[in-house]
Image: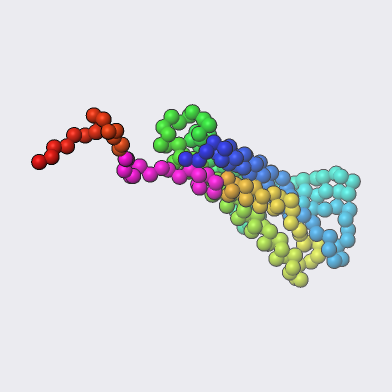
């Protein structure tokens, strides 16, 4: 069974990963305007997220508009919405399961069940981390592909936003926490035999010799 210190570390990693996943889901900073080539107009910049697109003026004013319909979004944004939401929910559920099966809590009294519960929480964190890394990597691939495509006008090219890097960090933290739980929360094998020791006194079993 994993020690309390490892489990507390995994809880901290899971909480940080959950915060990063929520930031990726809410903040519209997945794609930002690119000022390259002939596109030197920096009076305003465009920021795109999962739920809205924003226009930021050079004076600091910001105007945001929600997407009109889910059906008009690209496939990567549709998948990113679903994956990030599922990741946030799965991370929260895994943390609750971890609290129930951790050594530093008394929610579960059965000591044999605790490592199995912690292992289940570790698998949940691993899956949640992958659900964050996949959509941000997909969006990053599309941004880099369009940026290097000469057929895309310079005014329509985008760059990687801050949420892409936050998503990579959040996914790495969740995978690290889940991996530690899976390594240190392995159920103990109950198939091994038990050794019995007897003293030289009367407690040793008596044998009849012929």
Residue 66 in the image, given as x and y percentages of width and height: 71, 46
Give whichever of 152, 9 is nearer the camera: 9
Residue 76 in the image, given as x and y percentages of width and height: 63, 57
Give whichever of 30, 151 is nearer the camera: 30
The image quarter in which residue 147 lies: bottom right
Judge from the rendering whether residue 196 lies leftward or rightward of residue 210; answer left or right: right
Magenta residues (range)? 179-195
Q: Main secondary structure of the magenta part?
A: loop
> Is residue 187 depicted above or below 47 in this figure?
above
Give whichever of 33, 170 is nearer the camera: 170
Q: Residue furthest left?
A: 210
Q: Residue at x 55, y 43 (%)?
A: 90
Q: Residue at x 65, y 54 (%)?
A: 136
Judge from the rendering whether residue 104 lies leftward or rightward of residue 170; answer left or right: left
Q: How many numbered badges does the structure rendering display?
A: 0
Residue 138 in the image, given as x and y percentages of width and height: 64, 58
Judge from the rendering whether residue 123 lies leftward or rightward of residue 17; answer left or right: left
Q: Residue furthest bottom?
A: 150
Q: Residue at x 62, y 50 (%)?
A: 172
Q: Residue at x 60, y 40 (%)?
A: 9
Q: Is residue 37 shown in magenta?
A: no
> Is residue 145 depicted above or below 99 in this figure?
below
Name the image colouring: rainbow
Judge from the rendering whether residue 47 lies leftward or rightward of residue 210; answer left or right: right
Looking at the rendered image, the quarter that the C terminus falls into is top left
Residue 130 in the image, given as x and y percentages of width and height: 57, 52
């Amino acid at each position: 069974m994993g020690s309390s210190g490892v489990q507390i570390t995994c809880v901290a990693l899971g909480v940080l990963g959950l915060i990063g996943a929520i930031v990726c889901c809410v903040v519209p900073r997945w794609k930002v305007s690119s000022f390259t080539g002939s596109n030197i107009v920096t009076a305003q910049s465009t920021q795109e997220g999962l739920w809205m697109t924003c226009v930021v003026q050079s004076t600091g004013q910001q105007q945001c508009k929600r997407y009109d319909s889910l059906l008009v979004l690209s496939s990567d944004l549709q998948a990113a919405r679903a994956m990030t939401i599922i990741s946030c929910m799965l991370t929260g559920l895994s943390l609750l399961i971890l609290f129930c099966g951790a050594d530093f809590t008394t929610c579960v009294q059965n000591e044999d069940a605790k490592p199995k519960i912690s292992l289940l929480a570790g698998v949940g964190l691993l899956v949640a981390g992958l659900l964050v890394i996949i959509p941000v990597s997909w969006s990053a691939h599309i941004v880099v592909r369009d940026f290097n495509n000469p057929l895309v006008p310079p005014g329509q090219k985008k760059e990687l936003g801050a949420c892409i890097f936050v998503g990579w960090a959040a996914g790495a933290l969740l995978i690290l926490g889940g991996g530690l739980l899976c390594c240190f929360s392995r159920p103990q094998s109950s198939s091994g035999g038990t050794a019995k020791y007897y003293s030289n006194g009367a407690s040793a079993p008596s044998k009849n010799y012929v």
